[in-house]
Amino acid sequence: MVRMSTLPAGAAEHVDPARLPTLVRAAQRGDALAMQELLAALTPYVGRLAGPIALDDGQDAAQEALIVIFTSLRQLKEPAALFGWARAITVREAVRVARKASRARPAELDDVPDRGDPQLSADVRDVLERLTPEHRAVLTLRDLEGLDEQAIGELLALPAGTVKSRLFRARRSFRKEWDR
Amino acid sequence: MTWPVAELDNVARLRILAAAQPSALFAEEVVDAPFDAVWAVAADLERELPVLLPDVRSMRITAADGERLEGHARGYGGVRARFDIVLRPGWCVMQSRFLLGGMAAVPDGGRTRFAFLGGFRFPGMRLLAPAVEPLVRGYGPLVIRRLRDRLTGPGR
């Protein structure tokens, strides 16, 4: 599991990091008020991940991910790992929902630009719509979450070398599309 | 750089909270009244909960700290319960030792999508839920019907 001991950007607006362990423990005991507070903290984060991966099905994906998160919350042993655990579930659910909806375009264009590439700022959605859900997951984890290839590989159960080569190939052919 | 974000409104969030409860009943419908009118009724817990909920005789708010409230409810059978409550526009969740309740609302054009959540918090409810479900299935729709009546009734 990819662990995350600090809160992701934006999450601290919704929950005091110092209260997180107490809230998680209370929610695991079935305290609905703690659950609704955790829900308020997790929903923007889950939506930020599910949106780019599932696109038009982003709301469904975010809802499905949050249902899995809250129905299996008792399985989370370390409260500090909440967001990393939620991230893994969200990415998996978003890819699953997007694939099920069969709205992904064919994977003839596999590639993504470098992190921080100005080309990416033009229209991220256009870029994402040309990728499969699996590739959108890699791109989201790398560019939005800032994970390195090893962490992405760990989260997606892929060898780091595979992630690296996929990103390399993706980057190259993606640029061709932008240069047309 | 603008990435697509999936946003979930209060009704979707209450649906998630309901899905996480072993026994929760959840009902969601569009009410033909603007959000402000709907929430003015729903949020007036002392006055309106006894009107909306068939088994509640009275609700008294005994403490308030921002969006956190404490309320004492009495049922028709003489049952009393102390509730911890979170109440803010479009969102209300309350729980006692044995009961759970929630309401959510979002504007839907000039109308309002309203959701109701109810459930038991008994230990072992996960096992009892299938037996209880047929008995409480109609409760959520009944609450929403009463809300509609309240919004369109005399004086409204």
Image: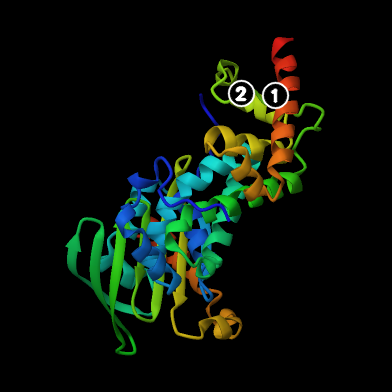
- Chain ID for label 2? A
> Which type of secondary structure does the marked residue at label 1 adopt?
helix
Q: Position of residue A9 (x, y in %)?
A: 41, 40
From the image, tell me which residue sits under label 2: A114
Which quarter of the picture shows residue A58? top right
Query: Residue B36, image x and y in percent?
Result: 34, 47
Q: Nearer the viewer, residue A115 or B49?
A: A115
Which mark identifies residue A171?
1
Can residue A133 be spotted in the picture?
no
Q: Is residue A86 left or right of residue A137?
A: left
Position of residue B6 relative to residue B94, above or below, is: above
Q: Do tags 2 and 1 sit on the same chain?
A: yes
Residue at screen point 41% across, 58% down: A38
Seen from this angle, which residue lies furthest top?
A180
Identify which amino acid the numbered label 2 is placed on: Asp
Q: Which mark is residue A130?
A: none
Q: Are marks 2 and 1 in contact (CB under 8 Å)?
A: yes
Amino acid carrying mark 1 in the image = Arg
Please name the residue shown 51% across and 65% down the image.
Answer: A76
Residue A4 appears at what percent x and percent y?
47, 51
In the picture shown, does residue A134 fall above or below A180?
A: below
Q: Is residue B56 left or right of residue A114?
A: left
Question: For the C terminus of chain B, which image quadrant?
Answer: bottom left
Density class for disc 2 (Cα within 10 Å; few <14, some 14-19, many ≥20) is: some
